[in-house]
C-alpha cells in the first residue's frame, strides 16, 4: 500500500509510535512501514527473516543515521499467528516491541529525522513484500505510546489528536481499498497491485 507523501509522515525530532498487527502466511522478510527516496535517504521498520531481526533503520544525506535491531532470536514469528509490532521514539530513545515486549532499544541522541519526499509504503518499502495480513495500522506523532512492556490492545484503535493514520483493514481478503479512519470525510487509499488467490502480490 502506497500513500502520497505528507507532512504527517515526517517524524522530525519528536516522539512517535508506528504500530500494526502482522500475520504471516509464509514467514519471510517484510517491510512494515517506510519511506524510500533513494539509497541515502530512507526510513524503514521491517523484519529480516534470514537473521532474524526486527529492525528500524533511518539514513538521510543530512547525516542522520540510526540502525536498531533485535540482536538475537528473541523474535521469531511463526506462520498463521498474529503479532503486535511497534517502533516507538521517546525523547532520545527508540524502542522496538513485539507482542508488548521490549526487544530492542537505542539512544540516537537528539537527532532529527529528515523530511523524506517519498510516499509512505506499508507491506513493501525496500523490496521485502509481505506475504500475509497486516491489520490495525496506526501512525502517531507527538506521543510515545509505550516505553516499557505492555499488553497489546485487544480491540480496534480509536483515533486521537496524535493519530495521523489509522487503517482498520476490515475489508475482504483480496481487497485493494483501505479506509483511513482518522477523520471524516474518510480517505480511501487504493493499493497499486492486485492479489492472487494464494495471497501473493502480482
Image (cartoon, helix red, strand yellow):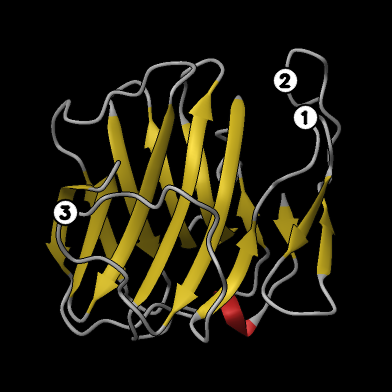
Q: Secondary structure at mark 2?
A: loop
> Residue, x 70% and y 67% (percent of image)?
181
Q: Is residue 105 left or right of residue 52?
A: left
Identity of the residue furthest to the front in this view: 155
Estimate the x, y position of residue 88 in percent, counting from the top left: 31, 65
Vertical comparison of 2 with 140: above or below: above
Q: Are marks 2 and 1 in contact (CB under 8 Å)?
A: yes
Q: Is residue 52 left or right of residue 166?
A: left
Q: Are marks 3 and 1 in contact (CB under 8 Å)?
A: no
> Residue, x 69% and y 73% (percent of image)?
5
10 Å neighbourhood of mark 1: few (<14), some, or many (≥20)? few
Q: In the picture, residue 84 is in which quadrant?
A: top left
Dot 3 or dot 1, earlier in sequence: 3
Q: Secondary structure at mark 1?
A: loop
Vertical comparison of 107 with 127: above or below: below
Question: What is the number of callouts on the image?
Answer: 3
Pointer 3: what residue?
149
Pointer 1: what residue?
173
Q: Is residue 57 left or right of residue 195?
A: left
Query: Distance between the Cα atoms at labels 2 and 3?
Result: 33 Å
> Residue, x 14% and y 60% (percent of image)?
148
Amino acid at each position: 500500500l502506497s500513500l502520497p507523501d505528507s507532512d504527517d509522515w515526517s517524524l522530525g525530532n519528536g516522539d512517535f509510535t508506528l504500530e500494526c498487527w502482522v500475520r504471516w502466511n509464509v514467514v519471510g522478510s517484510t517491510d512494515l512501514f517506510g519511506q524510500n527516496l533513494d539509497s541515502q535517504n530512507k526510513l524503514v521498520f521491517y523484519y529480516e527473516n534470514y537473521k532474524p531481526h526486527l529492525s528500524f533503520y533511518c539514513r538521510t544525506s543530512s547525516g542522520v543515521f540510526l540502525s536498531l535491531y533485535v540482536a538475537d532470536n528473541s523474535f521469531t514469528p511463526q506462520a498463521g499467528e498474529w503479532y503486535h509490532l511497534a517502533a516507538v521514539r521517546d525523547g532520545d530513545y527508540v524502542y522496538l516491541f513485539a507482542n508488548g515486549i521490549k526487544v530492542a532499544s537505542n539512544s540516537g541522541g537528539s537527532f532529527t529525522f529528515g523530511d523524506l519526499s517519498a510516499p509512505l509504503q506499508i507491506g513493501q518499502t525496500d523490496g521485502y513484500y509481505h506475504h500475509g495480513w497486516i491489520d490495525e495500522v496506526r501512525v502517531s506523532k507527538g506521543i510515545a505510546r509505550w516505553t516499557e512492556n505492555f499488553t497489546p490492545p485487544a480491540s480496534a484503535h480509536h483515533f486521537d489528536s496524535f493519530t495521523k493514520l489509522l487503517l482498520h483493514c476490515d475489508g475482504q481478503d483480496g481487497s485493494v481499498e483501505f479506509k483511513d479512519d482518522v477523520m471524516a470525510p474518510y480517505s480511501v487509499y487504493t493499493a497499486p497491485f492486485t492479489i492472487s488467490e494464494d495471497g501473493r502480490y502480482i
